[in-house]
Amino acid sequence: MNELQQVIGADNVKLDAEGKHVVIIDQTKLPNVTEYLTLGTAEDIYDAIFQLKVRGAPAIGICAGYGIYTLALTIDTEDYDVFLAKFREYKDYLNSSRPTAVNLSWALNRMESVVLTNRDKTVKEILALLERESRLIQEEDIEMCRRISEFGLSLVKDGDGILTHCNAGPLATSRYGTALGPILLGKERGMNFKVFADETRPLLQGARLTSYELKKAGVDVTLICDNMASIVMKNGWVQACFVGCDRVAANGDAANKIGTSGVAILAKYYGIPFYVLGPTSTIDMKCKTGADIEIELRNPDEIKKKFYSEPMALEEVPCYNPAFDVTDHELIAGIVTEKGICRAPYTESLAKLFE
């Protein structure tokens, strides 16, 4: 298996050989250390999601599906009502780990529906159905990412410059990824792109993860600071922007890693198409606009201390550290899903996906 296939085909979230624990690659240790973690308790799974050891909306959903299944295995009862109560306790706990990424609640609700629709079965039978459903979530994601990659690839041509923000490759999903999927699929087919990867402050997902994945895959990637996006666009080096998404509202407003909306504003000014790529599971039709999306606020130390040998600001200086921002639908040239490319007006094109 060559390096490109190793990147595309990596199992970054999976069940262990016995099917009793979740195994993830610790993304906080990349790119310098490749370490796999075995998650055996509810606290382990919560911590992995909250601390971004596993991250990316689809990967979080996969981890949640496997996680709630492995926790269900530990519920020692044959009584359905007791089982359901404990299952919901675990579900609510995991769901509180990160509020913005809709795939977390989507996967947990999907697993709960298995329990609710099989009340007439034994707990053992329900557990078997939960395992099947958890594996199906990942299998579906692999297929969705492949289709998203195909549609995304149709938007660019060989030799184009593409700017990315944060990380939406195989580490954040299964197999190809969303925003990086067209780039990796194109590489697989002999196409070459020039990628500019925003470092993505404050947690540097672009530097640590995107440049890592693309370089390993043999893609021509250049790392830039977030505040350099304007000059590479002005220089004519960028023909398209590809980003992932954590939640898309019914009107097309899209929540993604902090700084994404700034990239979209720059792209609009320079006449560069800005595309959002993600599975339909990331679209929340109950959420009317981006104003309804809860934005996660994180520890100020991520700005002042993380990745530094000593603090870069005085302890008493306050920090505002939102994990995400919302890109207005008017800035988005297209939303790429596994069912096709949606264009404005998004209230109509997104709704058609669910007909």
Image (cartoon, rainbow, N blue to C red):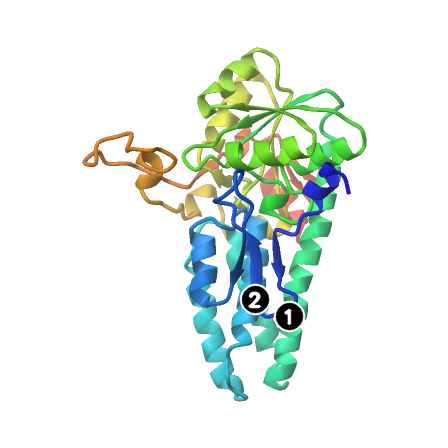
* Residue count near mark 2 (Cα–Cα under 10 Å), binned few <14, some 14–19, many ≥20: many
Q: Nearer the viewer, residue 199 or 3?
A: 3
Which quadrant would the C terminus be assigned to in this image? Answer: bottom right
**In front: 197, or 333?**
197
In the picture of the structure, the residue carrying the numbered disc 2 is 21
Looking at the image, the residue that sits furthest to the right is 189
> In the rendered image, is residue 166 in sight?
no
Report the side of 64 relative to 138 (left or right). left
Which kind of residue does numbered mark 1 sit on? Glu
| Horizontal relation, residue 78 to residue 305: left or right | right
Give the image quarter of residue 322.
Answer: top left
Q: Which residue is mark 1?
A: 18
In percent of the image, x 47 and y 32: which residue is there? 200
Q: Residue 104, image x and y in percent?
A: 52, 56
Residue at 73%, 45% in the rendered image: 146
Q: Is residue 200 above or below residue 41?
A: above
Q: Nearer the viewer, residue 232 or 290?
A: 232
With respect to residue 171, does 224 lie above or below? above
Instruction: Specify whether 297 is left or right of 272.
Output: left
Q: Quadrant of residue 315?
A: top left
Where is residue 34 drawn, in percent x and y?
56, 45
Residue 26 visible in the snapshot: yes
Q: Amino acid at mark 2?
A: His
Question: Pointer 1: residues within 10 angstroms few (<14), some, or many (20+)?
Answer: few
Contact between marks 2 and 1 (CB within 8 A): the answer is yes
Estimate the x, y position of residue 117 in percent, counting from the top left. 61, 77
Q: Is residue 159 above or below residue 294?
A: above
